[in-house]
């Protein structure tokens, strides 16, 4: 089979298992499977892994996939048997696999994270199940295992979209992928093309400006294809290629000697006003060194939230294609971490009333803009054990909020959604404007 045929078969099978295969696609899949020994091998193998996943615990997914793959290969000696097995799988797909798959909405598991900080609406604690969606790793290293058995080590800074058990998209950053036999045909997409695995371990690096992608095979073989599929290159062990503007070229230097420079067109905006708000109209503390956030266990407690204001005059908002709000977690040393849940969620809101976007240093809780009357822009999570790292949001809601602004000023509210479990819980802190304890808030605008 050609790489294009392998990719097409994998895509059609994924659609079949997710119950969105059209009649014409079903006919195409049948023709592929019934007319090629290699296609039957791959189809039976991948479909068996999907069926096996329905009966296995998460911790045993990879082992069971490998065992089932070995069983399938051992018993597929006869071409006619393969045809019969494929036909049985087609029938099973209609009666057994489809209803059960509805219980498994996730496509991967976050196996481990090493000093990781995230900008993501997906779960970011180890052993979390990951559905489709974006993960942006700001610092550290994270290991993700797809339910196909493929394992991916993501290195910060990086942004990735998890698409399915057999496919992901690396928008920028670096990753090393190991695909066992159960994940044969695993696809890593990049802004200018994609790589198709043929049972291997390989690395991918995408420049932050999304202008080039580099591929290096550690062991095995992959196919690198341009976005329009008119160019293709096969790479084997220790071979490298650069994909840029639709062209694929061999690379002589290893990754460690290759520079993947960030895009210099990113526009960074720092706040011109910050405020810490404390419930019960207490005197507000300065936000110069720290932004303080807390949610008490009772309504009479001392909740805290923050206001962040940015001046966007001189920014061409129509040209913005992506936006992110970045915050640096810093030590606070107020309250007990043990009196918080292990994972805490934070929300960012956009103030929609222009009359509330300007305030003085004496602003109070009772007169400040509230989340209830603002626009929810996104969430992120922080483990109670962390005292540092980069966090924030990068969402379509944030981009739309910025584009809809008509007075060249935007104001955000930062809250903690998760309340303390007992009185005296820890206050979370983020770097303020003076940068003394850590970097202050930054609004990143990408044209």
Image (cartoon, rainbow, N blue to C red):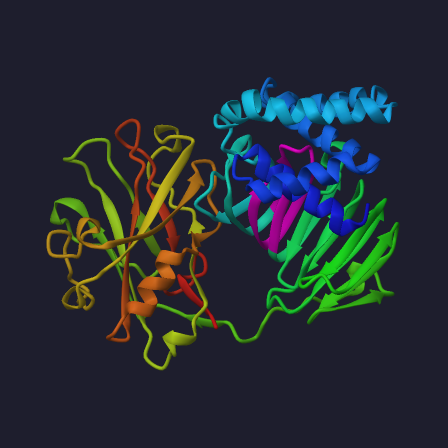
Q: Is residue 72 above or below residue 162?
A: above
Q: Mark yes or no: residue 432 visible.
A: no
Left or right: 54, with 339 as reference point = right
Q: In the rendering, at what x and y percent does residue 32 appear?
A: 74, 40
Residue drawn 74% across the image and 36% down it: 33
- Depth order, front residue of 158/310: 158
Q: Mark yes or no: residue 99 visible.
A: yes
- Is 143 a magenta residue? yes
Q: Is residue 77 above or below residue 290?
A: above
Quadrant of residue 84 within the rendered picture? top right
- Depth order, front residue of 417/192: 192
Residue drawn 29% across the image and 68% down it: 404
User: Would you say the magenta stretch is mainly helix, strand or loop?
Assistant: strand
Q: In the rendering, at what x and y percent does residue 178 appear?
A: 75, 40
Residue drawn 50% across the image and 24% down it: 99
Magenta residues? 141-170
Q: In the rendering, at what x and y percent does residue 346 appear?
A: 35, 45
């Amino acid at each position: 089979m050609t790489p294009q045929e392998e990719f097409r078969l994998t895509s059609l099978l994924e659609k079949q298992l997710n119950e969105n295969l059209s009649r014409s696609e079903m006919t195409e899949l049948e023709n592929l499977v019934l007319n090629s020994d290699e296609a039957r091998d791959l189809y039976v193998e991948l479909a068996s892994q999907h069926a096996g996943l329905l009966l296995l615990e998460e911790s045993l997914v990879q082992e069971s996939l490998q065992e089932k793959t070995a069983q399938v290969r051992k018993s597929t000696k006869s071409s006619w048997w393969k045809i019969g097995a494929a036909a049985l799988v087609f029938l099973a797909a209609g009666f057994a696999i489809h209803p059960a798959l509805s219980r498994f909405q996730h496509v991967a598991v976050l196996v481990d994270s090493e000093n990781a900080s995230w900008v993501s609406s997906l779960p970011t604690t180890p052993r979390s199940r990951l559905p489709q969606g974006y993960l942006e790793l700001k610092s550290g290293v994270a290991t993700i295992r797809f339910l196909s058995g493929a394992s991916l080590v993501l290195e910060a800074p990086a942004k990735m979209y998890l698409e399915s058990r057999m496919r992901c998209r690396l928008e920028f950053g670096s990753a090393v992928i190991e695909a066992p036999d159960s994940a044969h045909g695993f696809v890593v997409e990049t802004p200018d093309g994609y790589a198709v695995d043929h049972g291997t371990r390989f690395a991918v690096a995408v420049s932050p400006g999304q202008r080039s992608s580099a591929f290096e095979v550690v062991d095995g073989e992959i196919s690198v294809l341009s976005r329009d599929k008119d160019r293709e290159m096969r790479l084997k062990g220790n071979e490298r290629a650069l994909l840029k503007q639709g062209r694929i070229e061999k690379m002589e230097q290893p990754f460690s000697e290759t520079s993947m420079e960030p895009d210099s067109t990113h526009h960074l905006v720092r706040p011109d006003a910050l405020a810490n708000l404390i419930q019960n109209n207490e005197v507000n503390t300065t936000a110069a060194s720290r932004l303080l956030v807390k949610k008490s266990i009772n309504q009479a407690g001392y909740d805290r939230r923050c206001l962040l204001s940015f001046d966007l005059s001189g920014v061409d908002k129509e040209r913005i294609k992506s936006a992110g709000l970045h915050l640096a977690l810093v030590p606070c040393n107020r309250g007990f971490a043990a009196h918080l849940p292990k994972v805490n969620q934070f929300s960012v809101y956009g103030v929609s009333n222009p009359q509330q976007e300007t305030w003085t240093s004496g602003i109070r809780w009772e007169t400040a803009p509230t989340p209830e009357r603002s626009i929810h822009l996104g969430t992120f999570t922080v483990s109670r054990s962390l005292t540092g790292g980069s966090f924030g949001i990068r969402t379509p809601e944030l981009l739309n909020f910025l584009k809809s602004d008509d007075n060249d000023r935007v104001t955000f509210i930062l809250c903690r959604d998760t309340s303390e479990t007992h009185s005296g819980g820890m206050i979370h802190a983020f770097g303020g404007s003076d940068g003394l304890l850590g970097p202050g808030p930054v609004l990143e605008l990408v044209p």
